[in-house]
Amino acid sequence: MLARTDASGIVRDLNNNALLANDISARQAQREEFQRRQQMHNKLNDINIMKEQIQECLLLRDEIQEIKQMLLNHIQRDNQWHSQV
């Protein structure tokens, strides 16, 4: 059973509470809105992936800095040892 709604060209199916459009332009507008939302969702997903990748790069940078410092310390100790010999 169908019931009218406040929006012209849209009816409500009372069996499953679905909104049904009998207007072609309303259906096209709904499809376009769905596509816009899907694109926005995809862009947000891409942004979240890039944020994770940036965080991984920053962690890697910190680890590289730590390794460089350890190497410098080792070189300094080695130089001191050689100068004492």
Image: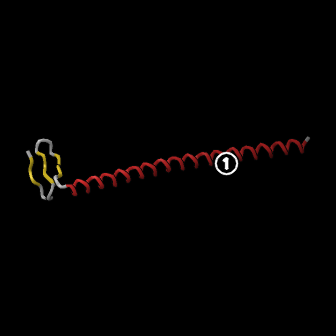
Q: Amino acid at mark 1?
A: Gln
Answer with left or right where residue 58 lies relative to residue 1: right
- The coloring applied to the image is secondary structure
Q: Residue at x 12, y 58 (%)?
A: 6
Q: How many marks can you see?
A: 1
Answer with left or right where residue 49 lies relative to residue 69: left
Write down the residue under mark 1: 65
Question: Relative to residue 39, is residue 15 depicted above or below?
Answer: above
Q: Find residue 23 and report its horizontal and vertical position in percent.
A: 18, 55
Q: Residue at x 85, y 45 (%)?
A: 80
Answer with left or right where residue 6 lies relative to residue 51: left
Q: Residue at x 33, y 52 (%)?
A: 35
Q: Find residue 30 and report its horizontal and vertical position in percent.
A: 25, 54
Q: Secondary structure at mark 1?
A: helix
Q: Find residue 1 and report its horizontal and vertical position in percent.
A: 8, 44
Q: Residue at x 22, y 57 (%)?
A: 25
Around disc 1, counting alpha carbons within 10 Å, would you say few (fewer than 14), some (14 to 19), or many (20 or more)? Answer: few
Answer with left or right where residue 13 lies relative to residue 56: left
Q: Nearer the viewer, residue 29 or 67?
A: 29
Q: Nearer the viewer, residue 58 or 29?
A: 29
Q: Nearer the viewer, residue 68 or 1?
A: 1
Q: Find residue 43 and report its horizontal and vertical position in percent.
A: 42, 52
Query: Looking at this rendering, what residue extends furthest in the right direction?
Result: 85
Q: Nearer the viewer, residue 84 or 21?
A: 21
The C terminus lies in quadrant: top right
